[in-house]
Amino acid sequence: MMSHTTPDGITEYDPEEVRELLEQDRILLVDVREPMEYAAERILGALLYALSTFDAAHLPPEGERKVVFHCAAGGRSLTAARMRQAAGQAGAHMAGGISEWKAQGLPTVRVGSRPA
């Protein structure tokens, strides 16, 4: 699946596509889950910006790297993308969230996965 655009203009990316764009340093992946969720398991390279304290104005503007949001299953990231779009910036998110990322066999960083 390639990216597509929702009727309200939000770009939705497939996890595999997000992985490739991250590796190419073409996106800034922003995790809008809560700090506890992020601490337990996260996507390497994703920055935490919880939706509960979210202010689209505080995110960097679109530049060389496109801002793409993700959450657990895709709901909160879509909300964040819509908030960013309402603030006059391009809105994009990863469909299915970290659960779809893992379902596709992509790697995550987990608490306790570090050598003891």
Image (cartoon, helix red, strand yellow):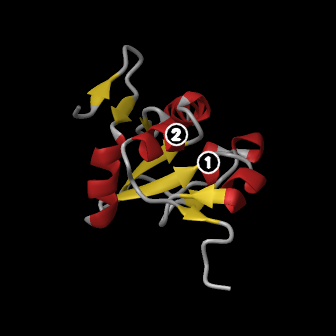
Residue in the image at 35% along x and 32% along y: 11
Which corner quadrant of the image does residue 113 belong to? bottom right
Check the image and report above or below for 6 versus 35.
Answer: above
Q: Nearer the viewer, residue 2 or 89?
A: 2
* Residue at the farthest front position: 116
Check the image and report above or below for 33 versus 38.
Answer: above
Q: Nearer the viewer, residue 106 or 28?
A: 106
Q: Is residue 7 left or right of residue 74?
A: left
Q: Which residue has dot 2 on it? A: 99
Residue in the image at 30% along x and 46% along y: 16
Which corner quadrant of the image does residue 9 belong to? top left
The C terminus appears in which quarter of the rendering?
Answer: bottom right
What is the C-alpha distance between the residues marked 2 and 1? 28 Å
* Residue at the farthest top position: 7
* Residue at the farthest bottom position: 116
Query: Tag on residue 20?
Result: none
